[in-house]
Image (cartoon, rainbow, N blue to C red):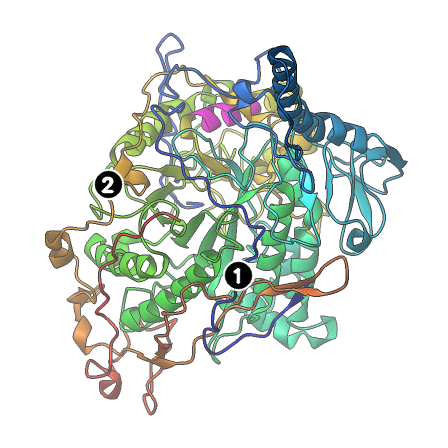
């Protein structure tokens, strides 16, 4: 797969491939079967739990994918999804016209037609696929489950000479570099790779998850997902080995800004190219295969804005991460996995955390450069939306997290309200409104209680609420681990289900098994822990294990079976309480100093291998007791009647640009802004070669050909303050207020479903 160069303007749209599956739109179903930060709000740590008292959780109602069912999970009536037909086979054969015959012969002929119509699809869908899979033996040099044993496979050899290639559990997968591994999926999932149609969406992660060629049913399908944290936004606690060489430098590496600065100076070890080596190795195709095999059907993919573009004074590796976003799209398509694409870092930082690009102050919607950074960020959100709304990608990325963990306490809910309203208008003018037109837009709860968002942006079109509940970033809980197993049920279930009822689609975009904040650099490079009482500013209770108490929690190899069993109960309770979730995170890298993974609470794959993560996430059903059920989603929450009708009163109360900005009540019209006169950096698209060696177009990167508005760029002749350190900077008069501001966006009009 190669990558086209970045364009400076939107290209004319190219014809879509005729073989694309049309989205099958489904009305909201009758009833849902469901029932915060790396720094989000924490669960009350010292709450007591009465084992005899019902705990909030999923409603007690029929459940379509019960792992305890003895019924064949591949049966259409049990899963809700028929097996996807193999490509290249017709479900009905052509028939010649027959001359009139006696009625009994006509009856026999009719019966034969019925038999053909029923048996042929079953044969090609189930029997032939299984026979093909068992037709030949191939030795594998690896497995997504760690096995190196030989496997049955329906396809071997050159991917470009065999046409459609597909396989289920035990099949051999050949990767781009020619190496192979054995696909392990005990849940009826199968992968698909079609060189003549690289946008084939027939793959299915599990029998109970809809294949990519079917629309995700937000009412009845359940997200069981995992984050790919630390991959394209490297965080110190996830990939400590990247940071450790520079932790004692003149300017220690504590975030990607300082990491990039140190790496760029380290030419002996490859400079910034070290980051691309990390991209190449930290997450690979085998991880996507293993994710599907673990019973997970979504990934949340954090990306930084510099995957698109950076300014000259920013040290980041520009544009390279996008090549790996495209790889993620390709691998997700191959294994039937959907993506929640999350814009994790925005210009100036929306939260001041190390995973926003630079640890320190908030300069997005805050401070002297708050408006300018927001203008720039809005363009990046728009550019991503244009890309993922293309027919080639809309089934892969049904959810777009537009801004991770904005600190609303610092920014202000009124300012956030104005920005999100404006953003909603910009994006829905691109995609159209109503079900099937562009992705759901996901907004983080901003560390506010979910109830505070119930009436936010009324009349919105397909907006989901994202929450990040964690147990470890609060007062240390010293009760035995076994007694903490139901804490997620008590703390999160009722609130999550209420938000589903009152706001609409609500997902837990992050959570972990961290019952305390032990782990290497969980609170930042060089920071201590609450558990050991060494975190600066923390005055609460500590663990009972002394000043080195985290050593036992960091060394998972010493954990007893009881500890693993208790942690698994915490996992099951969390899954049931949150209902639609993404664990943070799939993988934690080892320290280059100790050679060990020192933050084991946070690794799904490690827990899966060692017994504290359930091998089948459906086992979580009923862990919270089945109380506090959510109501069905209203049509207005899924793009139906009542959506895309934001009242004028809301717009008046939440204007864009806002009147003032924190922290000093700056008059927004006097602050420096950018001007919308820059060339559009259209994201590069992949190209593929089909089985005959001809190129297959990968789209042009731009969904809406009518969207030709230039992007914001600095005003010529203006001297701006540092956009990452300007909270209390002097306001440059030459760049304020009087410059062009693109702030009038027409309200979206309802678009018929495709």
Asked where in the image residue 468 lies, by quadrant, the reply is: top left
**Secondary structure category for the residue under label 1:** loop
Q: Secondary structure at mark 2?
A: loop
572 magenta-colored? yes
Apparent side of residue 681 relative to residue 1 in the rendered image (left or right): left
Q: In the shown orientation, is residue 425 left or right of residue 524? A: left
As drawn, which residue projects farthest toward the bottom? 717
Picture coordinates of residue 9, whole percent (x, y): 45, 77
Q: 605 above or below 406?
A: above
Disc on res. 641: 2
- Identify whether 125 is placed above or below 304: above
Residue 461: where, in percent of width, then height? 29, 48
Q: Measuring from the top left, give residue 626's x and y in whole percent.
A: 39, 16
- Crowding at mark 1 (Cα within 10 Å: few <14, some 14-19, many 20+): many
From the viewer's perspective, is residue 578 above or below residue 395? above
Pick the quarter of the image with the N terminus.
bottom right
Q: Is residue 509 visible?
A: yes
Q: CA distance from mark 2 to mark 1?
A: 48 Å
The outermost residue toward the top is 52
> Residue at position x 42%, y 59% from top?
385
Query: Which residue does the image show at 78% across and 52% down from the upper left?
Result: 159
Q: Which residues are magenta?
A: 568-576
* Residue 254 circle label: 1
- Compared to 695, does 620 lie above or below? above
Report the predominant secondary structure element of the magenta stretch.
helix
Left or right, residue 435 beside residue 303: left
For residue 307, which numbered disc appears in the image?
none
How many C-alpha atoms fall within 10 Å of the one at disc 2: few (<14), some, or many (≥20)?
some
Residue 440, percent from left and from top: 38, 47
For the image, the number of numbered tags is 2
Kindly tell me whether residue 569 is visible in this rendering.
no
Task: Give yes or no for contact between labels 2 and 1 (Cβ–Cβ under 8 Å).
Answer: no
């Amino acid at each position: 797969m190669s990558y086209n160069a970045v364009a400076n303007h939107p290209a004319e749209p190219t014809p879509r491939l005729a073989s694309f599956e049309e989205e099958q739109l489904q009305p909201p179903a009758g009833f849902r079967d469901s029932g915060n930060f790396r720094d989000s709000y924490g669960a009350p740590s010292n709450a007591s739990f009465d084992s005899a008292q019902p705990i909030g959780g999923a409603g007690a109602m029929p459940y379509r994918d019960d792992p305890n069912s003895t019924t064949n999970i591949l049966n259409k009536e049990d899963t809700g999804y028929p097996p996807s037909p193999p490509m290249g086979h017709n479900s009905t054969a052509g028939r010649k016209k027959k001359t009139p015959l006696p009625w009994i012969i006509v009856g026999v002929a009719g019966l034969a037609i019925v038999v053909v119509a029923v048996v042929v699809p079953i044969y090609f869908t189930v029997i032939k696929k299984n026979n093909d899979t068992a037709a030949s033996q191939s030795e594998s040099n690896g497995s997504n489950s760690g096995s190196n044993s030989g496997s049955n496979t329906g396809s071997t050899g050159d991917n470009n000479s065999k046409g459609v290639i597909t396989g289920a559990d035990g099949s051999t997968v050949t990767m781009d570099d020619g190496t192979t591994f054995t696909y392990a999926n005990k849940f009826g999932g199968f992968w698909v790779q079609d060189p003549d149609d690289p946008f084939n969406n027939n793959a299915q992660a599990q029998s109970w998850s809809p294949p990519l060629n079917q629309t995700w049913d937000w009412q009845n399908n359940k997200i069981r997902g995992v984050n790919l944290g630390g991959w394209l936004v490297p965080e110190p606690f996830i990939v400590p080995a990247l940071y450790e060489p520079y932790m004692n430098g003149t300017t220690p590496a504590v975030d990607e800004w300082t990491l990039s600065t140190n790496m760029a100076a380290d030419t002996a070890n490859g400079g910034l190219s070290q980051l691309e080596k990390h991209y190449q190795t930290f997450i690979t195709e085998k991880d996507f295969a293993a994710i599907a095999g673990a019973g997970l059907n979504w990934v949340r993919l954090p990306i930084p804005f510099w995957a698109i573009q950076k300014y000259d004074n920013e040290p980041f590796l520009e544009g390279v991460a996008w090549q790996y976003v495209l790889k993620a799209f390709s691998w997700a398509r191959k294994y039937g996995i959907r993506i929640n694409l999350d814009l994790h870092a925005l210009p100036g930082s929306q939260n001041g955390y190390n995973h926003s690009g630079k640890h320190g102050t908030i300069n997005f919607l805050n401070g002297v450069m708050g408006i300018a950074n927001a203008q720039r960020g809005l363009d990046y959100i728009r550019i991503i939306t244009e890309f993922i709304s293309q027919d080639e990608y809309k089934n892969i990325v049904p959810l777009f997290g537009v801004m991770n963990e904005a600190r609303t306490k610092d920014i202000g809910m009124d300012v956030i309200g104005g920005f999100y309203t404006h953003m909603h208008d910009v994006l829905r003018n691109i995609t159209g409104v109503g079900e099937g037109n562009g992705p759901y837009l996901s907004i983080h709860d901003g560390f506010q209680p979910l109830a505070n968002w119930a009436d936010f942006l009324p009349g919105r079109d397909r907006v989901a609420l994202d929450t990040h509940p964690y147990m470890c970033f609060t007062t240390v809980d010293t009760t035995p681990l076994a007694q903490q197993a139901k804490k997620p049920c008590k703390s999160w279930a009722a609130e999550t289900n209420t938000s589903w009822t009152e706001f609409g689609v609500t997902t837990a975009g992050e959570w972990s098994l961290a019952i305390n904040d032990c782990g290497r650099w969980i609170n930042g490079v060089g920071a201590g822990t609450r558990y050991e009482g060494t975190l600066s500013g923390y005055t609460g209770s500590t663990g009972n294990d002394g000043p080195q108490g985290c050593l036992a929690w960091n060394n998972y190899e010493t954990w007893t079976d009881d500890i693993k069993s208790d942690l698994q109960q915490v996992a099951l309770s969390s899954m049931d309480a949150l209902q639609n979730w993404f664990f943070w995170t799939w993988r934690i890298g080892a320290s280059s100093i100790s050679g060990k993974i020192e933050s084991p609470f946070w690794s799904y794959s490690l827990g899966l291998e060692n017994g504290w993560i359930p091998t089948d996430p459906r086992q979580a059903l009923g862990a919270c007791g089945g109380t506090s059920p959510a109501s069905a989603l209203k049509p207005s929450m899924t793009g139906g009647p009542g959506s895309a009708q934001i009242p004028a009163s809301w717009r008046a109360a939440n204007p864009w640009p806002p009147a003032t900005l924190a922290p000093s009540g700056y008059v927004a019209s006097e602050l420096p802004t950018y001007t919308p006169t820059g060339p559009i950096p259209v994201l590069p698209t992949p190209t593929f070669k089909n089985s005959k060696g001809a190129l297959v177009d990968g789209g042009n990167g731009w969904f809406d050909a009518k969207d030709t508005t230039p992007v914001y760029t600095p005003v010529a002749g203006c001297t701006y303050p540092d956009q990452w350190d300007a909270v209390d900077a002097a306001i440059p008069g030459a760049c304020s207020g009087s410059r062009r501001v693109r702030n009038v966006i027409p309200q979206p009009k309802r678009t018929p479903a495709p």
